Amino acid sequence: MTPHITPPSWIDDALEFCITKTRDNLATLTSFPERTEDGKWIQTKPDQHGWWVGGHWVGLLWLAYAATGDETLAASACDWGKRLLPQLNDQADHDLGFLFELGFILGSNLTGDESLKSPALQAASILSRRFNPRGQFIQAWGALDATPELRGRTIMDTMMNLDLLFWASKETGDAHYAEIATAHARTTLTHHLRPDGSTSHVCDFDLETGAFIKQDTHQGMSGTSCWSRGQAWGVYGFADCYRATGDPIFLNASRRLMVYLWPRLPADLIPFWDYDSPLIPNDVRDSSAASVLASGLLSLASTENDPNLASIWQNRAISILESLWKNYTSRDTGEASLLLHGTRSKPHNLMDHGLIYGDYYFVEALMRLAKPTLNL
Ligand code: GLY
């Protein structure tokens, strides 16, 4: 249960800054923003239909609408959301939750427009086809006839796509969606989570037998390291799984990830890109890992059954957000993103830039504090 607090006064200033910049971006973007280079958005190619990040931009527009009541922002969110729809014909990825939960379910919840649910139900149906019953996991990347290696891969990020399935079960009465989401979360818990509470980004399974092969990585430092955004996806995703299922193993998982990461944060609470980097403290941060973590902590606080812990999660979220607002926003620069110093993937040489998902979760967390009755 979220403890009742008066939101800190800087939250209104932070939200005003975010909404003004989002309006500016809306006036200039022609395709979906992904990351910044030299302070300007790199936009996804038109034939990518938003890639995995389009839902974050549409979601940001929905949040800006919720913050202001400005109907033109809701209309823009609807228009941009339509540009995601071709992804319902291209079943090459697990990220349908990011796309259609933020692009459509959020809009439906905020406006009451039932028609926005239909694409999200289609997305849940497509996502459910990626479930491997032998391994009890959802295939992360590649088409359903991709290489055996790809078809046998799971990633921490998928934890964020499960809420689409839980929602679909509630909407349709079909328990299958929730069953596969729960099974995938259990598999993640068993194989990605290590005894010390850290997580691997990737796990590989034998496609035919479903047997676990090894922990691995794609965007982290190594198969034995802990990639900070993956750990944040886990805190958030396991908290949502606990809310959906009531199974305490998921609440404990979210808490355990926090036990690992909290003492490893630097003084300003913004994680380095990988908790195991030997270059720390002279390495790049990932502000998106911080904003995902802050919003995930507010989700955890709202479902936590121990009131003392709920207060701790909420206070930690506020501290992270204050640090982001004071030291990591673009407010004194001309940069197009809201947050600076994100890291898409250091192994791919993509770091120290703005990221649209970092921006989305920053505003989502601010809105969770500023407007708790919206149940975001
Ligand atoms: N889901 C991809 C990422 O976190 O970069």
Image: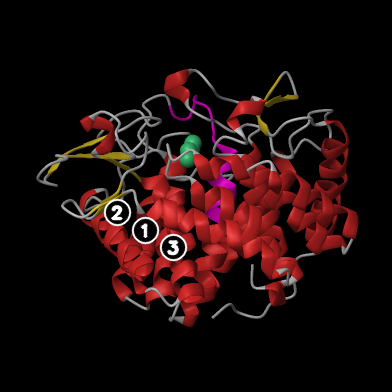
Label 2 amino acid?
A: Gly
The quadrant holding residue 334 is top right
How far is the residue under mark 2 from the one under mark 1? 7 Å
Residue 175 occupies which quadrant of the picture?
A: bottom left
In this rendering, the answer to whether 76 lies above or below 249 is above
Name the residue at 44% across, 29% down. Answer: 280
Instruction: Check disc 2 and report the residue beneath it.
Output: 197
Secondary structure under tag 3 reads: helix
User: Residue 5: x, y in percent?
Assistant: 69, 77
The residue positioned 37% from the left and 78% from the top of the image is 246
> Going 36% across and 58% down the picture, which residue do you hit?
259
Across and down, in percent, residue 237 comes to 44, 58
Coloration of the structure image: secondary structure
Q: Secondary structure at mark 2?
A: loop
- The answer to which of marks 2 and 1 sits earlier in the sequence is 2
Residue occupied by mark 1: 259
**For the residue marked with disc 3, what is the amino acid?**
Leu
Figure quadrant of the C terminus: bottom right
Label 3 near ligand 1 (CB < 8 Å): no
On screen, residue 287 above or below 251: above
User: Which stretch is magenta?
Assistant: 280-294
Mark 3 vs mark 1, foreground winner is 3
Q: Position of residue 178 (x, y in %)?
A: 37, 68
For mark 3, does the 10 Å Cα neighbourhood hold few (<14), some (14 to 19), or many (20 or more) residues?
many
